Image: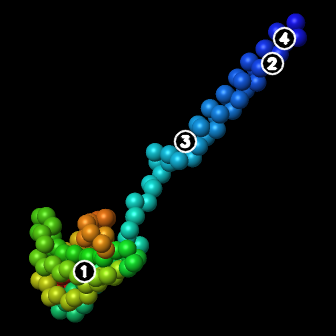
């Protein structure tokens, strides 16, 4: 009788331990996988990106793009494309800079009235040892509209 009680107790304890382990594994997986409505950050190398598009007098646009990463591990690049809207976005001018940990484009460009303009920016991080692209991020500036009466 005692042997039979010991066996039942052992089975019950084993089941409890098994259930506890399953709960622990499931709770760990739930913590690792974000819910579907959460956007998880993707930046693995690029620490900062920035841009600015400003309209000055007589159609003078200030075009700015910047990319930063840790210079110990990464070289970075920024491609800045000035785009004009004429039924679709078309690149009319582009600039590029590459540097160790920091790249910046800061340029002025005169544009025609009657159109909207924006910057398309492509930020790159390169492995400092191999030169391979580690990360690429595309983004856009706010748009500006240049009319003859605006400046």
Q: Is the C-beta separation of discs 2 and 1 under 8 Å?
A: no
The earlier-in-sequence mark between 3 and 4 is: 4
The earlier-in-sequence mark between 2 and 1 is: 2
- Indicate the position of residue 87 as horizontal and vertical percent values: 12, 64
Q: Quadrant of the C terminus?
A: bottom left
Which residue corresponds to mark 3? 29
Pair 2/4: label in front: 4
SS class of the residue under badge 3? helix
The earlier-in-sequence mark between 1 and 3 is: 3
Closer to us: 16 or 93: 16
Residue sitting at x 70%, y 23%: 15
Which residue corresponds to mark 2? 9
Pair 4/1: label in front: 4
Tell whether 115 sits left or right of 46.
left
Q: Distance between the residues labelled 3 and 2?
A: 30 Å
Closer to us: 124 or 106: 124
The earlier-in-sequence mark between 3 and 2 is: 2
- Indicate the position of residue 32 as horizontal and vertical percent values: 53, 47
Residue sitting at x 76%, y 24%: 13
SS class of the residue under badge 1? strand
Which residue corresponds to mark 4? 3
Pair 3/2: label in front: 2
Which residue corresponds to mark 1? 98
Q: Distance between the residues labelled 2 and 1?
A: 69 Å
């Amino acid at each position: 009788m005692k042997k039979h009680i010991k066996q039942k107790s052992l089975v019950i304890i084993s089941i409890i331990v098994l259930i506890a382990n399953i709960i622990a594994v499931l709770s760990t997986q739930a913590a690792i996988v974000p819910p579907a409505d959460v956007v998880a950050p993707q930046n693995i190398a690029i620490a900062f990106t920035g841009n600015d598009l400003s309209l000055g007098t007589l159609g003078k646009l200030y075009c700015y793009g910047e990319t930063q990463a840790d210079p110990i591990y990464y070289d970075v690049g920024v491609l800045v494309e000035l785009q004009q809207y004429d039924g679709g976005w078309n690149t009319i001018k582009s600039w590029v800079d590459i540097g160790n940990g920091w790249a910046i484009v800061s340029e002025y460009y005169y544009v025609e009235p009657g159109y909207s303009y924006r910057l398309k920016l492509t930020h790159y991080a390169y492995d400092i040892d191999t030169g391979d692209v580690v990360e690429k991020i595309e983004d856009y500036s706010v748009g500006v509209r240049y009319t003859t009466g605006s400046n």
